[in-house]
Amino acid sequence: MVSQNFRDYLMPDDSPRIAAARGVDVYTYGERMLATEKARNLMAHWQGLLNETFRGITADGRVRPDLFELRDEGFAAQGAVAAAEALLATLNDSQRTRILHPIDAREWRAWYNPEIPFNDFGVRLEFTSRRTQEAFWGLLQSCTSARGFEKVRQLMDANHFLGELYDLNNIMNRWSFHFMIFGEPSASRPWGWSIYGHHVAFCCFILGRQLVIAPTFMGVEPNVIDRGDGSDCTLFTEEERLGLALMQSLSRDQQERATVYRLMEDPAMPPDRFNFADQRHLGGAFQDNRIIPLEGICAAEFNAGQRRKLLAAMETFLDFLPDGPRAARLALINTYLDKTWWSWIGGCRDDDVFYYRIQSPVVMLEFDHHSGMWLTNQEPARFHIHTITRIPNGNDYGKALLSRYRG
């Protein structure tokens, strides 16, 4: 049985993984890791997906039209514009050139989640000035709820904490993330920005008083920061708790139909259902056009209490959105509640590890307990968690809204 104390799975100091990263810059480390066949194959696969024309995630290969409308969601666009302009003012000419991209640039879709630098788009915030880093906090704060702002800060700090555990802050630190701006910051015209790197990807599209933040990738290994200096916290407890509470509220028959695989690495899984990078996730990096069939059980047969639990879980995933955009997103999600599907992998006892997915025409959310990457546990554990939010049918990166704006 897997211990729930992540420190029981720390790599030994002479581990080859640590040796490859110690005392070198991130690009040298990247060259060493990308020299392996597994990493090269993954990079080639991702590049092929990036080269595809964007369509969006669908359930059956057909993009449903007219799901997303231009509207006033009450987003404070001018504050975000001012924050972006303040950040740009801190950059030199070379950095500004690397950061700025057209609104529909392919680089929107180039985010990844490992610590290995699979590309070099934008600028890595660790190589910018303290003024730029402080200005980034201002931009993040202007586009998120108070909870969202704190969550992203905690995730970036969790990356730093993992680096501290192995004396590898040269590779993993709170600023080792790519940053880009798309379009020109404007209170009325479309623009956006993204940040991505190890366990964080945050794609933010802004059109007037309307805001889309999707896709997002948020993860942590370990999920506990325990320096003992007042910064201690445990992450993703609500996503875990609320998902399990919903599953446990289902009848035995409903649980059986919701469970698509009983084992986290089930021999019944087809070859494309599990991979070493995403494990059970289907909507990870570069999966913008993936066909993801509906699985499990439809919420149309949930009772009132189960529906409340489902909505509570979804709201927790989307708590990074400011009040107006979050209310608009949840209202749209509620419109399609009877076309929302709940699926599960693993057990549902109090201490089990599991994966779940919530999927409808307008939202896809994934939660997964992972096995070790920087820890040695061979089985999934609750201290390594990945979550993903997507908007199917073409509105990741706000692309459906951009199309509507352009007419």
Image (cartoon, rainbow, N blue to C red):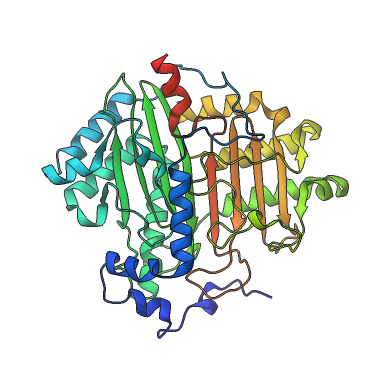
Q: Is residue 256 above or below residue 362?
A: below
Determine the residue located farthest toward the left in the rendered image: 93
Q: Residue 204: where, in percent of width, then height?
A: 39, 36
In the figure, residue 381 lies in which quadrant? Answer: bottom right
Q: In the shown orientation, is residue 358 left or right of residue 33?
A: right
**Which of 247 and 27 lies nearest the eye of the viewer?**
27
Q: Residue 39: where, in percent of width, then height?
A: 45, 64
Residue at left offset 86%, top offset 49%: 252
Determine the residue located farthest toward the right in the rendered image: 253
Q: Is residue 321 visible?
A: no
Q: In the shown orientation, is residue 181 left or right of residue 381?
A: left
In the figure, residue 75 lies in which quadrant? Answer: top left
In the figure, residue 230 lies in which quadrant? Answer: bottom left
**Which of 170 and 101 lies nearest the eye of the viewer?**
101
Q: Quadrant of the N terminus?
A: bottom right
**Which of 167 and 61 lies nearest the eye of the viewer?**
61
Q: Is residue 191 visible?
A: yes
Residue at left offset 24%, top offset 42%: 99
Q: Quadrant of the C terminus?
A: top left
Q: In the shown orientation, is residue 237 left or right of residue 298?
A: left
Determine the residue located farthest toward the bottom in the rendered image: 14
Residue at left offset 64%, top offset 41%: 292
**Which of 94 and 91 lies nearest the eye of the viewer?**
94
